[in-house]
Image: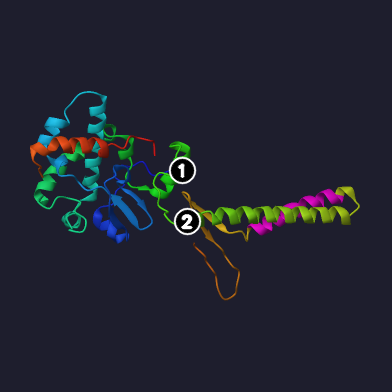
Amino acid sequence: MSKQDSANISPLHRQLVKQRAVIVTKDPKLHLVWIHNRIFIKPLPRYIVSYAFWRDYMGGDGEDAHDIRRAALGYLRTWLYLVRYESDFRIAQDPSLHLIPPDITWDQFCRFVSDLTTIADHDVPTRYTYGEIRLTRLNFYAPFLLRKAYFQRVDYQYGTYFARFYGPVLFVIGAVSLILSGLQVAIAVDQGHPDKENNQLLSTVAFWKQPFSGSLMLPLIEVNGPSWRISFAVLDADRLLVSDHAIGSTDQMSDCYVSFKYHIGWKSTGL
């Protein structure tokens, strides 16, 4: 699984260094989830940086209010790591992303996040005790932990969907073929040597030699969540072939709170 470290979050400029495209999402469960060259980030809502919002709508009692408050703190703390330098702040305010409201200044943002350093892991849901999480791993474990076919669908074409099964299918076919070949050799040894004691030894050697020697030529299967990459090493003198596959108005805060309750809380699933 992923490393349980809430600080395992690369700032925005490092995301670009890693050649990851920042994808804006309104779904909080995808916040800081990445796959291949993409990472999903939920923009910072204007109302969540409002003191009036926290005073009027986030100070309630009850288990539900407590869970929402913990989720909000965990989400806010991620911005402490996403925006560490002014260059990260400029990236977040890029017109193509709008991750942070444009009327918030760098000094205001620094003053706001300065208090987030006191938020500990026991103050946030389990989800936010992790940093970035690989989507392929979430999809792999979703059937076992969430009883769902996937955590988030990423393949919308049949060709791409079925391509991920090619590796496992080829591996099973190759393994079965090797076992059957070993059985065939063992049977041939039994028929060709009448000595019973020698037959048993030769049959055992013949049965295990074929799969062992063939396994050296089998594809190297790399399990990366549900995605399988298969690399064929072709012994050739000339080549090695690799196939790889700021503040809002108070009269709007009630509506914002309803939206916030729906969107912000990704309850812990242990992932």
Q: How has the structure been colored for display?
A: rainbow
- Is 106 situated left or right of 22 in this image? left
Asked if residue 136 can be seen in this view, the reply is yes
Please give the label number shown on residue 98.
Answer: none
**Quadrant where the C terminus lies?**
top left
- Work out whether 93 lies above or below 257: below
Amino acid type at image mark 2: Tyr
Most extreme residue toward the top, as rendered? Answer: 62
Q: Quadrant of the N terminus?
A: top left
Where disc 1 sits, the SS reads loop
Question: Which is nearer the N-term, disc 2 or disc 1?
Answer: 1
- Which amino acid, mark 1? Ala
* Residue 192 covered by magenta stretch: no
Residue position marked by numbered label 1 in the rendering: 149
Q: Are marks 2 and 1 in contact (CB under 8 Å)?
A: no
Q: Main secondary structure of the magenta part?
A: helix
Residue density around tag 1, few if under 14, some if 14–19, many if 20 or more, within 10 Å: few
Residue furthest to the right in view is: 194
Q: Is residue 119 visible?
A: no
Q: State the image coordinates of residue 50 (x, y, percent, origin top left).
A: 12, 39
User: Quarter of the image holding residue 70?
Assistant: top left
Q: Position of residue 135 (x, y in %)?
A: 39, 48
Using residue 144 as the reference point, say whether residue 133 is left or right of it. Answer: left
Query: Residue 60: x percent and y percent?
Result: 18, 26
Q: Which mark is residue 158?
A: 2
What segment is highlighted magenta in the picture? 198-215
Q: Residue at x 83, y 48 (%)?
A: 200
